[in-house]
Image (cartoon, helix red, strand yellow):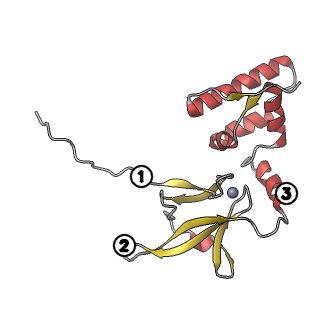
Amino acid sequence: MDATPKPAVKKPADIQVLHCLNSECRGLLAYEVDSQNVLYVDLAWTAKVDGDTRYFPCPQCNGRNIVEEFRTDKGQMKHRVVRWEPARGNVGSREADQLAAERLDLMPRTVRDKLDRVGIKLHLEQWQRLPMAERERLRDLPCEQADDVTRYATTVEQLVIGLSGQPPDRIKPRA
Ligand SMILES: [Zn+2]
């Protein structure tokens, strides 16, 4: 019998999708980072530049996720996302919200209306974890007749249970 514990063969991948550093937003940004927000593939060159500042704009809150260069223990130059700053000025933020809703990064008005009707609270974070096809489905499914409302509620419920193992939060349906 071999009783020696197996050595850890593989370090679990410490890669995640970058979330906006604004704790009230946490919007998804299309960059892979490790748990220290160090860019996995160094795409810092795609950052926007404003004077000495480099940042990834957040499509959701429009804020700036500031990117800075640093040197690793091994002397490598890398980049990491260090903090969040609000966008300078609010020009265009409505348009940005509109665009984000059209791209289904944000919940479109029509989905929010349907959720109100069925009495389910779908959190933005849950919405953003849904595959795009499911977001399109929730946008396009009818939710007018009583049958539709029931079916819509069931669909959302199953999706949320699929995500988290928990049924969604319920709210008072809007008549
Ligand atoms: Zn954001």
Which residue is nearer to you in this view: 108 or 131? 108
Callout 2 amino acid? Asp
Label 2: how many residues lie within 10 Å, few (<14), some (14-19) or many (20+)?
few
Q: Position of residue 47 (x, y in %)?
A: 63, 71
Q: Position of residue 153 (x, y in %)?
A: 74, 24
In which of the image's four quarters is ligand 1 placed? bottom right
Residue 146 in percent (x, y) is at: 84, 18
Find numbered disc 2 in the image and state the secondary structure of the residue it sits on: loop
Q: Quadrant of residue 155?
A: top right
How far, Cα to Cα, is label 2 from label 1?
A: 20 Å
Residue drawn at (83%, 27%), measured in percent from left and top? 117
Q: Of the residues under marks 1 and 3, which one precedes in the sequence?
A: 1
Q: Which residue lies furthest to the left in this view?
A: 1
Q: Which amino acid does label 3 sit on?
A: Arg
The quadrant in which the N terminus is found is: top left
Residue 73 is labelled as: 2
Question: Which quadrant is home to the C terminus?
Answer: top right
Q: Say whether mark 2 is within 8 Å of ligand 1.
A: no
What amino acid does circle 1 point to?
Ala
Numbered disc in front, either 1 or 3? 3
Residue nearer the viewer, 104 or 77: 77
Taking the spot 56% from the left edge, 28% from the top edge, the residue there is 165
Q: Residue at x 76, y 53 (%)?
A: 100
**Circle number at residue 94:** 3
**Residue picked out by circle 1:** 13
For the residue with label 3, is its CB less than 8 Å from the closest atom of ligand 1?
A: no
Q: Are marks 2 and 3 in contact (CB under 8 Å)?
A: no
Which secondary structure, mark 3? Answer: helix
Classify residue 140 by image quadrant: top right
